[in-house]
Image (cartoon, rainbow, N blue to C red):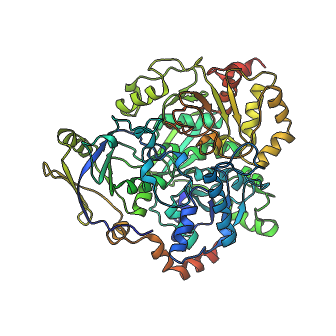
Amino acid sequence: MAYDKFTILRSTAVPMPIENVDTDQIIPARFLKATERKGFGDNLFRDWRYNNDDTPKPDFVLNNPTYSGKILVGGKNFGSGSSREHAAWAIYDYGFRCVVSSFFADIFKNNCLNIGILPVTVSPEFADKIFAAIEADPKTELEVNLPEQTITLLSTGESESFAINGYKKHNLTNGYDDIDYLLSMKSEIETFAETRPF
Amino acid sequence: MSTPKTLFDKVWDAHVIRHVDRHFIHEVTSPVAFLGLEGRGASVLFSGRTFATADHNTPTLNQHLPVADPLSANQLAALERNAIKYGISHWGLGHEKNGIVHVVGPENGITLPGMTIVCGDSHTSTHGAFGAIAFGIGTSEVEMVLASQCIMQPKPKKMRISVNGTLSKGVLPKDVILYIISQISASGATGYFVEYAGDVFENMSMEGRMTVCNMSIEMGARGGMIAPDQKTLDYLNGRELAPKGEAWDKLVPYWESLKTDEGASFDIDLTFDAATIEPQITYGTNPGLGTGVTHQIPVAEAVKDGAASYKKSLQYMGFSENESMIGKPIDFVFLGSCTNGRIEDFRAFASIVKGRKKADNVTAWLVPGSHIVEKQIKDEGILDILTNAGFQLRQPGCSACLAMNEDKIPAGKYAVSTSNRNFEGRQGPGARTLLASPLVAAAAAVTGVVTDPRILIDNE
């Protein structure tokens, strides 16, 4: 699936300092019935975002016009639970291109990398600084620099470097996906498959 | 002498770029993968290594009728269409082998020791009970496996969790895994692949091992595995799709080599004492927020979650710190799922409800994991016990575990569930889930409140 290339992103951010945000919250199961990948952003955080009668919950951050941007900053253990890639699709479709947390669940992180969202793991201290900076000024901008692997709070200039698998970085920067790479190795794959005992 | 290897290393290292031996697909996470495949003009490389079953979004009553919800029907039709188009084995709704993917894989002998197994479902970790490396993947990866039979994965770190000693009466495999998760938290094994070791797992049935490995993901681990032994081979031998005769015999020495070598090292090695484990129940909104059923809800300072998140969790549940779990009124009981939808789970449930009656205030949904389990329930006379106690048996599927079909717990209601997740809204918008074993679920079903099942066992 093609996605936008990721290099340097400068944006305000939406803070969500809640721990253990699981993928059932990001997109509840009843919205997984589609057979095409479109429109999931409408139901991003559905049950935190809307009341039963579909009216917006005013105290939820996505309904607060003070906060906006292409970066979502979550609490510890973001994206736990179900492997549904629909969670990453919903985040992308809503308009986020980067998710920042001090700790990501594995499958969610992989799913993000596979569809063009950059998951940035920061130290708990840096996460706290980001939350504090946004609380003090919601217009605070962050700069996420993938080639340099840095995330910077532009208001103070404080910066931290983040880790990313070199292969995944190459893919994200160029908008490539794994499948093209694997298909280029088809004959080696077929040869290896012959050796398997079952 | 070569370097000692763990069970995980032995299976992992045998797979060059993570060749996938078995790939399971279901109706929810595969349609977009097939669309992607078509979009790039690719095809399915090894259709014989992928198996399709419909489970997540199927009704559990009147499966012979057309599926009422058009979106669900469309998803089921897409799975069938794709399976036919690419020559993939498909056990759709109504098929005699249909059931939850992680129940039907092992019971039909598709799952074997030493395999790599993936599925677009996080509870794929279940298959680790057979000494396979099995883990959940996203839809992009489903497409990847369809196209190339391979997957790109960084090698996780290794954790061993040993539980030694003897489990007390009334303590089931579900209690063991809920206890472990409560000790290390819902993110305590993120980044790791777990091996379960020690007498408790050695003495556990294959069904019990599946329950344990199933919930590895609930502490963040990508998967969990248990070394195959005679019990593993006895379970698989003769199953319909397992190798037969000479083919089986040739694999046995390899399977017997699949155990962690003496001296092999783990990044984390944890040990628990079986005697300290009681029947468990969760009180919060992640699987790490659980405790012994006779315990009180801990204060915020005593749990690993942040105080604000913990408060939010208890508020959602309608609970307070220091409250006792025993005696809390409940509205629903759910027996089923890939965690506890196997024959042993129904036997355990029946052992408590036998000669008793379902409490009037409780709605119970008993959902077998597959048609094969359903048949066992009938053949063993368990259905009669359940019926006499006022329970109804539904038809196989994931059902209220994720509430994608119409089996939704209503807002604000409490459900004691044998499934795997107690997240907000997991079992229906606003639903409140208490995760527990089939015995704890049965005790709640006949008393209408959270009850220590050991009291009911004593009375027999």
In-front residue for pair B302/B363: B363
Residue A74: which quarter of the image?
A: top left
| Residue A82 x %, y % | 51, 48
In the figure, is residue B199 to the left or right of A100? right
In the figure, is residue B206 to the left or right of A140? right
Location of the C terminus of chain B (image quadrant): top right
Identify the residue at image location x=49%, y=27%: B317
Q: Above or below — where is B353 with respect to B34?
A: above
In-front residue for pair B442/B200: B442
Q: Above or below — where is B255 with respect to B65?
A: below
Residue B201: which quarter of the image?
A: top right
Q: Is residue A197 visible?
A: no
In-front residue for pair B73/A7: B73
Marks counted in the figure total 0
Q: Is residue B327 visible?
A: yes
Identify the residue at image location x=38%, y=33%: B309
Q: Above or below — where is B51 with respect to A190?
A: above
